[in-house]
Image (cartoon, rainbow, N blue to C red):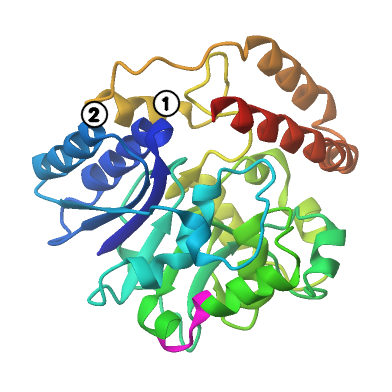
Amino acid sequence: MNILYTLNDKFVPQVAAGICSICENNKRERNINFYLISDGISNDNKNKLVEFGRTYNRKVIIKELGDLNKYFDFDFDTLGWNNVILARILMGKLLPKKVERLIYLDGDTIVRSSLKKLWNFNLGDNILGMSIEPTVDKKRTVDLDLVNRPYYNSGVLLVDLRKWREENCEQTIIEYYKSKQGLLFAADQDAINGALKDKIKTISPKYNFYNIFYQYNYKFLSSLCDYKYIPKKTFDEARKNPVIIHYLGEERPWRLGNKHKYRDDYNYYLSITPWKDKNYEDGWKLYFFCWNTFNFITKPIPKIRYRIINGLIPTFMKIRKHQLKKEK
C-alpha cells in the first residue's frame, strides 16, 4: 500500500498525526510506504518523520519538490491555498516508477479504520477514485464544463498511477489549468475535475468525510445535484462510521476553541507522535463562538445557511491569501 502526502514545514505535525492514524489502524497490512513530497521541510523534521515510520516498521520516503514554477510555463495564482497543493498533479513524475497505485491524502486528514477496502476498490477503466462535493457553487460547475456531472473533492484520491502516466494526465491537467489562465478558485482540484471528468469513479464519502455531511441532511445535499447523487444507504453508512476524516474549512482541531465533531481523533493520534507537545493555534476563540452560534441558528434552514456560506467563501479566501503572504 502506497500513501502520498504533500506538505511544508508548518504542516508536519498534522501529517505525522495522519501517518500515525494509518499505522495504528492498518497493522495487518504487510507493507505500507509513505511518500512525502516536501516543500522545504527542515532536516530535523525529515529525520523525525523517517524515524517515526520505523517505529511501526514502515518506510517514509521524502522527495523534495524544489522550485514548483519550473513545472509550469505560465503564471498561476492559487489564491488562498498554499502552492504545495499543486504538487499532487506532479505525482507521476516525482514518485518512483515502481509506484503504480496510491492513495493520496491531504495533510488535514485522519484515518479511523482500515484502508484495505479503499485500496482494493475497483476503478474499472477509470484513473481516479474521488468523493463528490455536492455543495460546490453552480457557477463553478458551469465554468468547468461540468453541467449534469458531479464535482469531486481532491482531498482524498485513489490513483491508478500506471494509467495516470500512460495517459499523460499530468500534462492534460496542466494544459487545462493553462487554458483557464492559471486562475481557478480551487486550483488543482478544479483542474482535475475539468480535465479528467471522464476518468473519475465515485467513492463513498466515508473515505472523505467533512463537515457538510453532518451539517446538511441527505435530502438537501441531493437537491443541490443536477445528476444522480449517491444512494441514501451509502450516505447513512458514511455518517455512521466514516473511515477518513477531512478537516476541511476553518474549524480545525489544532485551533483552540474548535468544536469539530471528530477533534478527539486528531488529538489522540497527535498525542502519540514526536509532535505531541506542538502548540495549538490561538486567536480563534471569537471566530468559533460566532461560528457555533451561526450553526445553531441556521441548522433548521439549510438553504439559507448554504447561501450565506457560499457568499462568505470569497472573503475567507482573501483572508487566507493575506495570511499566506504574511507567513512568507
Circle 1 residues within 10 Å: few <14, some 14–19, many ≥20: few
Q: Nearer the viewer, residue 292 or 230?
A: 292
Identity, as a three-letter code, of the amino acid under mark 1: Asp
| In the displayed structure image, the side of residue 128 where residue 305 appears, left or right | right
Quadrant in which residue 182 is drawn: bottom right
* Spatial CA span between label 1 and label 2: 15 Å
Location of mark 1 (residue):
264
Residue linked to disc 2: 273
Q: Quadrant of residue 79?
A: top right
Q: Nearer the viewer, residue 32 or 179?
A: 179
Measuring 67% from the left and 40% from the top, which residue is drawn there?
80
**Residue 213 at what x, y percent from top left?**
64, 46
Tag shown at residue 256: none
Q: Nearer the viewer, residue 22 or 102?
A: 102
* Residue under the point 88% across and 42% down: 307
Circle 2: residue type: Thr
Residue 26 in the image, given as x and y percentages of width and height: 23, 52
Please tell me which of labels 1 and 2 falls first in the chain: 1
Q: Is residue 181 visible?
A: yes
Crowdedness near tag 2: few (<14), some (14–19) or many (≥20) residues, C-alpha within 10 Å:
many
Image quarter (top left, top right, bottom left or bottom right) of the N terminus: bottom left
**Position of residue 38 measured from the top left corner of the image (x, y, whole percent):** 35, 47
- Residue at 22% in and 36% down: 43
Highlighted range, magenta = 166-170
Q: Is residue 168 magenta?
A: yes
Q: Of helix, strand and loop, which one carries label 2?
A: loop
Q: From the viewer's perspective, is 271 left or right of 185?
A: left
Residue occupying the point 17% across, 37% down? 47
Judge whether residue 254 is colored magenta.
Answer: no
Asked whether the viewer can see residue 156, the reply is: no
